[in-house]
Amino acid sequence: MDRTTFADHAPTPDVLTLELHCHSEHSHDGVDPVEEMLARAEAVGLDGIVVTDHDTIDGSLEAIDRADAYDLVALTGTEVSSAAGHVLGIGVDDDIPRGLPFEETVERIHGAGGIAVVPHPCQTLRKGVLANEAVDPADLTVADAIETYNSRFLTGRTNRQAARLADRLGMPATAGSDAHVAEMVGKATTRVDAEPEPDAITTAIREGQTGIDGGRTPLWVTLRQAAGTARRRARRVTR
């Protein structure tokens, strides 16, 4: 898949290839440490990464501390559990409280200096904000972009729905692997026409200077994640 959405101009030769949605062991359902996520990003030729652990920026701060060693640019990030479903905060300077209404969550992300990206909006199992009709589709325009390609899917129907929605609302499109294990980092990426600097990247995403590439996460990887998550939960119970 290769869906280009660069707005108003052809991309420059220095377009960045970025992983905008992935989870480390700082997430309750993540498996691998940040260092392994970075090593994978370097190995597959990415320019940068945003670790978006659930309701914490701790993993992304660790990624920023280590990114230079892997020749990567890293941004702060988190996947916030709003009352309606998940919202990515990219470039935020603090954690965002969970459980707030969708629009307030977006406001908090903006107030923390970041951009709000709506991930997998139509996926029920991924807690998309549209899956249970908790948010009117028109209200998504308070956010800055919609994730139109998430690599964790079976048929691709919900990705197509998200892409049509972004087109209808005139919103920028992003992609993300939604990796919960290191080997899936870079499975779906966003090309951003920007200098390798956090503020330039978030500005370019907000302005729609993006293109997306991706493939589907294999079922065996999803099963490995589930097994790893179960082992982590078992260890917590026995401590």
Image (cartoon, rainbow, N blue to C red):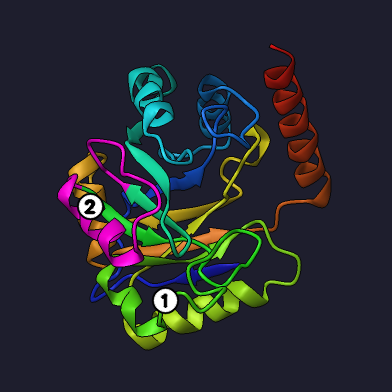
Residue 173 position by quadrant: bottom left
The answer to whether residue 99 is above or below residue 229 is: below
The location of residue 96, given as percent across then percent down, is 31, 44
Q: Is residue 217 left or right of residue 214?
A: right
Residue 238, label in figure:
none
The answer to whether residue 144 is above or below residue 88 is: below
| Residue under numbered circle 2 | 108
Pointer 2: residues within 10 angstroms few (<14), some, or many (20+)?
many
The location of residue 157, given as percent across then percent down, is 66, 77
Q: Residue at the spot x=54%, y=34% of the render?
A: 27
Q: Residue most toward the bottom?
A: 168
| Residue under numbered circle 1 | 135
Q: Please count the marks in the image.
A: 2
Residue 65 visible from this viewpoint: yes
The answer to whether residue 203 is above or below residue 223 is: below
Residue 12 visible from this viewpoint: no
The N terminus sits in image quarter: bottom right
Residue 225 position by quadrant: top right
Q: Residue at the spot x=50%, y=27% of the render?
A: 38
* Amino acid type for the residue under numbered disc 1: Val
- Range drawn in magenta: 90-113
Dot 2 lies on which element?
Answer: helix
Q: Is residue 89 located in the magenta-colored stretch of the structure?
A: no
Q: Residue at the spot x=34%, y=18% of the render?
A: 65
Residue 126 position by quadrant: bottom right
